[in-house]
């Protein structure tokens, strides 16, 4: 199926296209936690990458995203109402923050324990359905100190990986990075047993600025398989268009082939199933 057709198919699929209803009211954050994520995107290479992630904690809800995305959205949100959504000045400010490898935003509702997962293709938001199965933790009697927090060890199986988490009861917030929640305290550190993905809390501070945690209201509802197919097809189509724009056929083919090879190196997602 051609990329443009596949992308259009996703947009019109009636079982998945739903205007996003209000999941919960916007809420002022209380705390923000900044985690360092160290990860190995290519299972065939030992090269690791690092990215800062931010957990924004409210009384009833939280959000989790890349620090790059968080800063870019803050710049866009600061636009004056009578100006274009993004003017040239703010675009220049945003550019350094568009290099994230994680475009998703994860929202958690502390009351119903549900997780709401959003991702983007360019500027269009998608609400990707989650099974919201409860994460079953095994809390052990092992303890250690991490960044001055007295932490306790817990383990779980999640999305095809075995995970080790360290939480502290000193911060009685049942939350953590990514989709992890459900322990009797904030998760300070968590990693899978292969150490492909490793989150570590570097900073926790009170919020002093006037912002709110709010979920996109008009996202297109879909599933992960359909989103991945549309996302891959959209960007491949863009590469093909650029490659064929004035380049000799051999150069165009090489550009497209290089892009495909680069994508093959992204073979180690955080969720294996």
Image (tube, grey):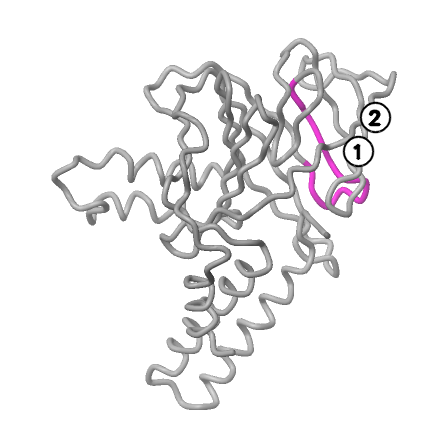
The picture places residue 33, in percent across and down from the top left corner, at 54, 24
Q: Quadrant of residue 35?
A: top right
Disc 2 residue crowd, few under 14, some 14–19, many 20+, Cα 10 Å: few
Residue under the image location 25 percent in, 43 percent down? 90
Q: Is residue 191 left or right of residue 128?
A: right
Residue under numbered circle 2? 138
The picture places residue 248, in percent across and down from the top left corner, at 40, 90
- The answer to which of 203 and 154 lies nearer the viewer is 154
Q: Is residue 247 left or right of residue 232?
A: left
At mark 1, the secondary structure is strand
The reply to whether residue 104 is visible in this rendering is yes
The picture places residue 69, in percent across and down from the top left corner, at 43, 41
At mark 2, the secondary structure is strand
Q: Which residue lies furthest to the top in this view?
A: 170
The picture places residue 243, in percent across and down from the top left corner, at 41, 79
Relative height, residue 194 to residue 203 (above, below): below
Q: Which residue lies furthest to the bottom in this view?
A: 249
Residue under the image location 38 percent in, 53 percent down? 124
Q: Disc 2 to disc 1, how far (Cα)?
A: 6 Å
Relative height, residue 60 to residue 23 (above, below): above
The reply to whether residue 99 is visible in this rendering is no
Residue under numbered circle 1? 156
192 part of magenta stretch = yes
Residue under the image location 44 percent in, 28 percent down? 24
94 part of magenta stretch = no
Extent of the magenta region: 186-198
Q: In this view, does 24 lie to the left or right of 210?
A: right
Residue under the image location 80 percent in, 44 percent down? 194
Cβ–Cβ below 8 Å for labels 2 and 1? Answer: yes
For the stretch drawn in magenta, what is the main secondary structure? Answer: strand
Disc 1 residue crowd, few under 14, some 14–19, many 20+, Cα 10 Å: some
Relative height, residue 47 to residue 38 (above, below): below
């Amino acid at each position: 199926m051609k990329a443009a057709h596949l992308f259009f198919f996703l947009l019109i699929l009636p079982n998945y296209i739903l205007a996003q209803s209000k999941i919960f009211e916007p809420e002022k954050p209380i705390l923000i936690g900044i985690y360092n994520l160290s990860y190995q995107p290519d299972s065939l290479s030992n090269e690791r990458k690092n990215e800062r992630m931010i957990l924004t904690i409210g009384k009833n809800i939280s959000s989790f995203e890349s620090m790059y995305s968080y800063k870019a959205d803050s710049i866009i949100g600061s636009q004056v109402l009578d100006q274009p959504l993004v003017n040239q000045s703010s675009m220049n400010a945003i550019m350094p923050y568009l290099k994230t490898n994680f475009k998703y935003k994860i929202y958690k509702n502390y009351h119903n324990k549900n997780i709401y997962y959003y991702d983007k293709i360019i500027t269009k938001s998608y609400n990707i359905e989650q099974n919201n199965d409860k994460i079953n933790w095994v809390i052990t009697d092992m303890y250690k100190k991490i960044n001055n927090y007295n932490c306790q060890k817990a383990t779980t199986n999640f999305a095809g990986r075995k995970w080790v988490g360290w939480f502290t009861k000193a911060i009685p917030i049942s939350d953590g990075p990514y989709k992890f929640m459900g322990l009797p305290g904030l998760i300070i550190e968590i990693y899978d047993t292969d150490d492909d993905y490793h989150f570590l809390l570097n900073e926790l501070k009170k919020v002093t600025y006037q912002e709110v945690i709010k979920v996109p209201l008009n996202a297109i509802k879909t599933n992960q398989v359909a989103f991945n197919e549309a996302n891959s097809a959209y960007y491949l189509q863009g590469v093909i268009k650029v490659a064929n724009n004035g380049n000799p056929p051999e150069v165009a083919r090489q550009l497209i082939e290089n892009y495909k090879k680069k994508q093959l190196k992204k073979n180690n997602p955080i969720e294996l199933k």
